[in-house]
Amino acid sequence: MDLDSIAAWRTLELKMKWLGALFLLVLTGTGGADLPPPERSYKILMLLPVGSKSHRNVFMPLVEALADRGHKVDMLTSYDIQHQNPNIREITHGLPHYPRATINMFNDAQTAFGVVLTFKDQLSKMARDIYQVPRVKELYRKRKEYDLIVLNHNYNEFMYPFVHEMLFITIASAGMDPRQSATLGNVLSPAYMPTLFYEANCEHVFGRFANTVTSIAKPFYWRNWEVIPAVQKEINVHFPDLPPLLELERNQSLVLMNSHFSTDLTVPLLPFQVEVGGMHCRPAKPLPEDLRSWIEGAGSAGVIYFSLGSITKGTTLPTKYRNMFIKAFSKLNQRILWKFETDLEGIPENVMIKPWLPQQDILGHPNVKVFISHGGRLSMQESLYHGTPMVTLPLFGDQPINGARVIANGWGLSLNYEDLSVELIISSLEEVTNNATYVENVVKTSRLYKDQLTSPVERAVFWTEYVIRHRGALKLRSPAASLSWVQLLLLDVLALFLLVIILSLIVLHWIFKTVVRAVFGIQYLKKKFE
Ligand SMILES: *[C@@H]1O[C@H](CO)[C@@H](O)[C@H](O)[C@H]1NC(C)=O
Ligand SMILES: *[C@@H]1O[C@H](CO)[C@@H](O)[C@H](O)[C@H]1NC(C)=O
């Protein structure tokens, strides 16, 4: 596929999507497709008191689709955003313990270990304080009025008191979490499955060794050693009679995972693990006039889109790096669209700066050739969906792993901040814009991703309602979930085997001795009487 035909494909795809969406709208009156009509209006409580804006963005398409189907959704969040839809009510807890949106990721929590320690601190403070917030208390008191609770899987263990004796499902906003999967009875082999935030080279025995050790050590550290015990201690103060948090966790009916095999690792899944990756991805809408004419005015050189996401503000980008980018951009033929929160001095002619940009509409424009991002999961999914190659600048969390995936899949390049230079920025951007393999790979993935029988949102809605319809859908659960790890790894069976072998050896030994004694004994006696 050459570049022109790819651009043509993307334009066509765009038009087709719009026609399709319009057709559906006319046909059904709503955005929904072939879902069975809801049996009644459900009351659903969404809990995502901790998590960045991107966690919230993973939830919102489902929330909106449920609301469109007439269900009432109450959301407990950490952001003060009010929704227009009358079926959605957002409740903010107002606690300041999770200042992820304001901290400067270039200064703080650079090391993985530092991140875990801040989590321990923040999550136990949340556990201590959240049940004292009047609005949360009220919600807790009324929780049994809800048909279902939907919980953010990542970092929200302190919310499990809410789900005691309740129907609940989780959303894994970072996709497959092998720790969660194992808890629910689907143990993925560390021979190929990386742990969250760490990926070793599994083709090499040392890589698999490291992977196996981290697969055991990290969950143990989080669940049994450091973080959850601290959270549990605080929870015990408020709820002395509840089962342990980790036991409540096991009672979840379903996991909606923000992943898809076309863009993530292909792994064995059980029926309760439903892939709904990229729910937030949608066809591009027409751009505002100023952006459209600017992007199209770039001609065949095209446009580079630069945004570091919602947590890492452009303004926290250290001046050293900022100046490198400005200098590099001034030497490029492309135009650059840069999401940056304030004005910048001395920016070259070919750079346009805006505090906010309609990311998906930009990525979907055929003249946008590269996306320079922080390598966050949602940005990566959007880039793949719209078929735009990437240059990622990972900083923390899952970003380094995502960067490694970008390289391994040939979706683009990934750069380390430590190595950054004007020359490296220029050569990387030139490589990704000039070498057609990147856009070819991304478009291939995009086509694979879009080739689905149902849309991710439809699947999420269907399974959410399914769990309510079937009162927890216990049949979805794996019998493995109720086994202890000793039982699951067959360690007791192994012990039994050993016992049988040892006993057999003892018996054999005894028989052998008796026979020998009998044979030689008789010979000995014979000798005596001859
Ligand atoms: C486990 O979930 C079921 C419904 O799925 C619920 O009826 C039951 O009370 C829950 N058990 C606990 C201990 O929360
Ligand atoms: C284009 O990129 C691919 C993948 O990185 C590489 O194998 C290939 O040699 C590059 N082609 C050129 C002409 O540089």
Image: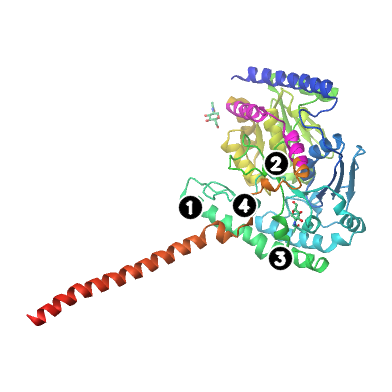
Dot 4 corresponds to which residue?
479
Dot 1: few (<14), some (14–19), or many (≥20) neighbours within 10 Å? few
Q: Is residue 318 magenta?
A: no
Q: CA distance from mark 1 to mark 4?
A: 33 Å
- Amino acid type at image mark 4: Pro
Disc assigned to residue 206: 1
What segment is highlighted magenta in the picture?
Answer: 437-465
- Front-most of residues 282 and 267: 267
Q: Quadrant of the C terminus?
A: bottom left
In terms of secondary structure, where does tag 1 sit?
helix
Judge whether residue 238 can be spotted in this image.
yes
288 displayed left or right of 189? right
The mark found on residue 258 in the picture is: 2
Mark closest to the chain's N terminus, 3 or 2 = 3
What separation in Å lies between label 2 and label 4 (alpha carbons)?
A: 24 Å
Point out residue 79 in the picture as x, y percentages from the top left corner.
86, 48
- Pointer 3 residue: 229
Q: Quadrant of residue 162?
A: bottom right
Give the amino acid type for the residue marked by disc 3 in the picture: Pro
Q: Amino acid at mark 1?
A: Phe
N-terminal label among 1 and 2 = 1
Q: Amino acid at mark 2?
A: Asn
